[in-house]
């Protein structure tokens, strides 16, 4: 759910210009805002990486107590000075007319070759609100992980995705060793850790 405004919180958009348009878009915004101490700020500019809306899903098999994680090269991770392959959950951007749950189901097939049997919505959040407009709806998806694994992805999008079904205990151990640094994956796995017994009872 979006943040609920507190009394007096107002922002005025004065101007928006596109600073760069390539595979992604960077826009420059000129704002004025209300101040908590009273009155209004002067004009100030911020660059925003305009990304759109995404959906992410953690596939989970409650019978085998396994999660499905994926691993692929990430340019942003490389630019951050980290090893550019990291454990993630299935995710993708919404195309026009799609809903987040539809994208979660589609991407599960495209990226991991697994069918989502049921979905539980977890959170809808902004991953980096100071600089990026991307909103992400995160789900837990019930799957049968019996035959999950291998290398998947769309050739047209240059995807080379390693898919692995692993015991949930192993995924939690990766978290404990700080070996998962993708925010959506951390959030979904922590949610499952909190609700583990409840969701297994519900889905078995």
Image (cartoon, rainbow, N blue to C red):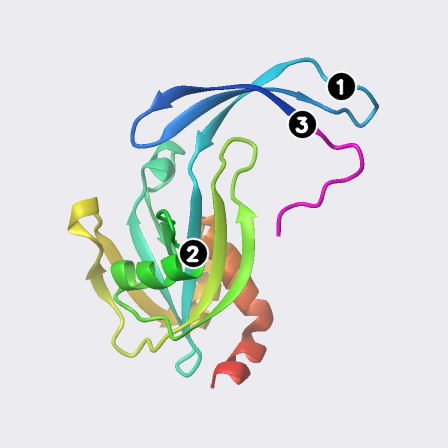
Pointer 3 and pointer 1: residues touching (CB < 8 Å)? no
Q: Residue 114 in the image: x percent, y percent?
A: 29, 69
| Residue projecting furthest to the top | 42
x 16%, y 50%: residue = 155
**Apparent side of residue 70 relative to residue 175 in the rendered image (left or right):** left
Q: Which mark is residue 99?
A: 2
* Disc 3/disc 1 C-alpha distance (Å): 9 Å
Which residue in the structure is indicated by mark 3?
Answer: 11
Q: Are marks 3 and 2 in contact (CB under 8 Å)?
A: no
167 in the magenta segment: no
Q: Earlier in the sequence, mark 3 or mark 2?
A: 3
Main secondary structure type of the part rendered in magenta:
loop
In the rendered image, residue 43, in percent from the top left (x then y), is placed at: 64, 14
How far across and down, in percent of the image, does residue 140 sit? 47, 66
Which mark is first along the chain, 1 or 3?
3
| Residue occupying image coordinates x 52% and y 38% | 128
Q: Which numbered marker is on residue 110?
A: none
Local secondary structure at mark 1: loop
Using residue 144 as the reference point, say whether residue 128 is left or right of it: right
Residue marked by disc 1: 40
Eyeballing the image, is 10 above or below 203? above
- Label 1: few (<14), some or many (≥20) within 10 Å? some
Label 3 to label 2, Cα distance in Å?
Answer: 28 Å
- Vertical order, 158 against 185 (above or below): above
The quarter of the picture where residue 109 lies is: bottom left
From the viewer's side, name the closer residue of 104 and 184. Answer: 104
Range of the magenta residues?
1-10
Badge 3 crowding class, 10 Å Cα cut-off, few under 14, some 14 to 19, many 20 or more, is few
């Amino acid at each position: 759910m979006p943040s609920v405004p507190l009394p007096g919180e107002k922002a005025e958009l004065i101007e928006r210009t596109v600073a760069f348009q390539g595979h992604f878009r960077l826009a420059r915004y000129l704002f004025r805002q209300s101040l908590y101490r009273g009155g209004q700020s002067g004009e100030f500019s911020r660059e925003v990486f305009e990304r759109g809306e995404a959906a992410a899903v953690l596939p989970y098999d409650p019978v085998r107590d396994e999660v499905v994680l994926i691993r692929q090269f990430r340019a942003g991770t490389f630019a951050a000075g980290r090893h550019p392959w990291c454990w993630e959950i299935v995710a993708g951007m919404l195309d026009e007319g799609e809903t987040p749950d539809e994208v979660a189901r589609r991407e599960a097939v495209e990226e991991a070759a697994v069918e989502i049997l049921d979905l539980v919505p977890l959170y809808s959040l902004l991953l980096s609100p100071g600089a990026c407009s991307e909103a992400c709806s995160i789900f837990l998806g019930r799957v049968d992980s019996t035959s999950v694994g291998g290398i998947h992805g769309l050739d047209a999008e240059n995807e080379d995705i390693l898919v692995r079904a692993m015991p949930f205990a192993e995924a939690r151990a990766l978290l404990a060793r700080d070996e998962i640094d993708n925010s959506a994956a951390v959030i979904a796995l922590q949610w499952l850790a909190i609700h583990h017994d409840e969701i297994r009872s519900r889905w078995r």
